[in-house]
Amino acid sequence: MASRVLTAASRVATKLSKTSRTPVSAVARRWRATQAATYEETLNVPETKVTKLANGLRVASEDSGIPTATVGLWIDAGSRYENEKNNGVAHFLEHMAFKGTSKRSQTDLELEVENMGAHLNAYTSREQTVYYAKCFSKDVPQAVEILSDIIQNSTLGEQEIERERGVILREMQEVETNLQEVVFDHLHASAYQGTALGRTILGPTENIKSISRKDLVEYTSTHYKGPRIVLAGAGGVDHAELVSLAEKHFGNLSVGYEEGAIPLLDPCRYTGSEIRVRDDDMPLAHVAIAIEGAGWSNPDNIALMVANTLVGSWDRSHGGGANLACKLAQASSIDGLCHSYQSFNTCYTDTGLWGVYFVTDQANVEDMIWNVQKEWMRLCTFVTDFEVQRAKNLLKTNMLLMLDGSTPICEDIGRQMLCYGRRLPLPELDARIEAVNASVVRDVCMKYIYDKCPVVVGVGPVEGLPDYSRSRAGMYWVRM
């Protein structure tokens, strides 16, 4: 029976091949077209649509058709726009946004969000303030209206302000127990000493105790302007509907400035320097070493991202030993140089910090610094195309994995609209990464790392941290 079926099938196939006008090769191509899309083909969709309102506010969204959505306001205002007297006001204002408006009390706001099954959140960085909501797609109009209400109609009541002082002071105490946060605050204070980037986001204690309602209102009226705000949306979001909602709820946002002058970012000069906070009672040393990197829009930033991936990260749970791809990770694993390390590339509008943060025992601080700088010198001189290709593949993978879900996509849209004035299409970003080779990495690392003054911060038992002159000397090689 099987042989007769096979023969019949063969006859049908033969007949089709004789009578069909479609060549067999065309059939094969059509069959291959139904297979999984290639990496390049998946980078095209969905499109990010952008519309600019009459008052300068931009609406940017990506519709993926899922039943949930994230919508948020990305505002070009953070701690960098503060001065010494009002440092901490942007973060204070973010806290006050959820304490009630002229339309809703704090209880009404919380109940409304909970009844929607939504999540309302906010955060402040050195250059941006963000308010966003995660909700069902059908609830996007309500979520946008709530976002509009909290940034335009917050009551900023005196009782709520006094209550929030205590909340922020407790938050500052919690941050002080997070040693990584402490190290990075010191890193900014040292690298950008005397400038706005050198100040912390939360502000000093004396400012938190003295910030008034007048300070909050003044900051809002100065910086919450249409041209400096992006309404971003991702997930199940219809762009035309989002534009209509923006015109309805944000169309009255002012464009001009009361004193006529648009607040501009003052340049933040970088200074190679160090800070040591020695405490031998602490079990481990927390150390960061960095150089001045590139700003968001600087074309060198892509090569620095690849170099950052080459340095990589590691902790003792990884194992791996000599089989690890990153040279610094190999040394850390085999020689037990540290408990963990991670490379970082922190970008701002016109500058950045590129470096390594690590946690280690007191006895290994000096050796770890030496190995970090050795790896940096290798990037400047001997990095190979094979390593760079591996790093590019890993970088692209990590960037795509970070866009898993409506919230990270919405965040990516809002941040890029403020940083670049547009959202970089994934094919363009892919092409920029692919254009980087070993020669480009060596040239860029030579430009930013070689013979440059580092900034070094150590917290804990850092007796073994080399003095600054030795750290500076490790930024170049003398070869005979």
Image (spheres, helix red, strand yellow):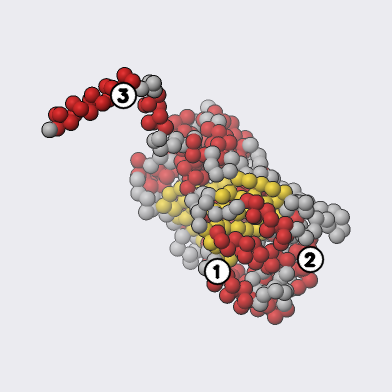
- Which corner quadrant holds the N terminus? top left
Between the residue at mark 3 and the residue at mark 1, the CA separation in whole angstroms equals 58 Å
Q: Which residue is mark 2?
A: 218
* Circles 3 and 1: CB atoms closer than 8 Å: no
Which residue sits at x=40%, y=29%? 30
Identity, as a three-letter code, of the amino acid under mark 1: Met
Q: Secondary structure at mark 2?
A: helix
Residue 237 at x, y percent in the picture: 58, 54
Which residue sits at x=68%, y=67%? 150
**Residue 16 image label:** 3
Nearest to viewer (mark 3 / mark 1): 3
Q: Earlier in the sequence, mark 3 or mark 1?
A: 3
Q: Residues within 10 Å of mark 1 (few under 14, many from 20)?
A: some
Q: Earlier in the sequence, mark 2 or mark 1?
A: 1
Q: Secondary structure at mark 1?
A: helix
* Circles 2 and 3: CB atoms closer than 8 Å: no
